[in-house]
Image (tube, rainbow, N blue to C red):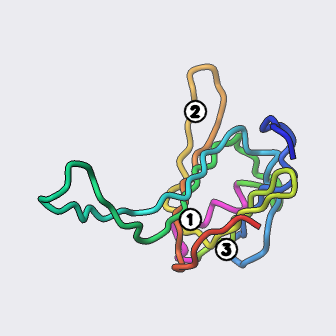
Amino acid sequence: MAKESGIGWTTLSVDDSTGTPRAIKNDITNFEMATPRAVQDVTGVDKSAMERLLLLADMSVTLNGVFNDATGMSHDVFKTVPSTNVARTTTLTHSGQTLAGELLFTDYAWTRAADGSLTFQAPGVLADGTVPTWA
């Protein structure tokens, strides 16, 4: 594949609290996704530069969107974040490249701006110890 823009995501879905995947990409205006690795500093006093070991893998996502309380859309997915303790399969696909993970969503925050817009932010973090991999 060649260089591409971020336009035209084919899948952005999150399970609701019952485990049903919901395609909510129409409600999402922008998002951040990260797959960082922890590192351990193992630099001995005999070194002139840092020496590190790669440790555990992680995944996080922050979804930002427009409030939509239609059945099966973003509010249906995230309204139970404060009251349930369930991991939710979150799938991001672009140009045939898919990253999926079991995430715990830790907040469902609304913003009502001065111009009247109603938006939300939903951050999620890796839940199950499975290394996130692109397929």
Under tag 1, what secondary structure? loop
**Along the viewing direction, whichever of 31 and 135 lies nearer the viewer:** 135
Amino acid type shown at disc 2: Arg
Q: CA distance from mark 2 to mark 1?
A: 19 Å
User: Which residues fall within the magenta stretch?
Assistant: 75-86
Which element carries disc 2, helix, strand or loop?
strand
Quarter placement of the C terminus: bottom right
Instruction: Estimate the spatial distance between the alpha carbons at disc 2 and disc 3, rounded to whole Å.
Output: 25 Å
Residue 17: numbered disc? 3
Mark 3 or mark 2, which is nearer the start of the sequence? 3
- On whether residue 102 falls in the magenta region, the answer is no
Residue highlighted by disc 1: 81
* Rendering coords of residue 59 (x, y %): 54, 62
Q: Label 3 is placed on what type of residue?
A: Ser
Q: Main secondary structure of the magenta part?
A: loop
Which residue type does callout 1 highlight? Val
